Image (spheres, rainbow, N blue to C red):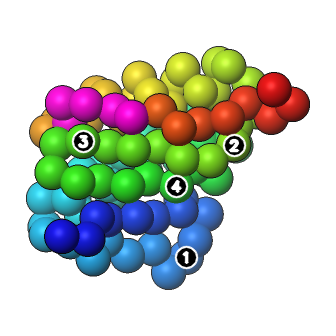
Amino acid sequence: MRSAECRIDSPSCRFPVGLADSNTGQQIMESFWASNLPGLRRIAIEVRRDTVTLLGEVGSYYERQTAVARAAQVAGVSRVVDWLRVRGE
């Protein structure tokens, strides 16, 4: 099964998997945008069932921690895989 992937700053963002994965990814994206942290808008989000994987580069450890915490708070997410890098590290 393919997973749902989306870059938040992509206007053509699509979630090719089932409705539940799509809704989860959309809720995470909305949470990231609401944070007003620009680094969170460049994170790629992959959703497979109840597991979310975050990929990309953020500007600080605070942005990294915030992204993981916000993703974990979304209903239906039981595991967050953190593949985020902090710029300059």
| Mark in front: 4 vs 1 | 4
Secondary-structure class at tag 1: loop
Q: Position of residue 8 (x, y in %)?
A: 53, 59
Q: Amino acid at mark 1?
A: Pro
Q: Amino acid at mark 4?
A: Ala
Q: Quadrant of residue 40?
A: top right
Question: Which numbered tag is attached to residue 51?
Answer: 3
Secondary-structure class at tag 3: strand
Q: Which residue is mark 1?
A: 11
**Residue 80 counted in the magenta span:** yes
Question: Which numbered tag is attached to residue 44?
Answer: 4
Q: Residue at x 67, y 35 (%)?
A: 85
**Upstream in the sequence, badge 1 or badge 2?**
1
Q: Amino acid at mark 3?
A: Thr
Q: Which residue is mark 2?
A: 57
Secondary-structure class at tag 2: strand
Q: Position of residue 55 (x, y in %)?
A: 54, 47
Q: Is residue 2 above or below residue 36?
A: below
Q: Position of residue 79 (x, y in %)?
A: 25, 31
| Mark in front: 1 vs 3 | 3
Q: Residue at x 34, y 32 (%)?
A: 80
SS assignment for the magenta stretch, majority: strand
Residue bounds of the magenta highlight: 77-81
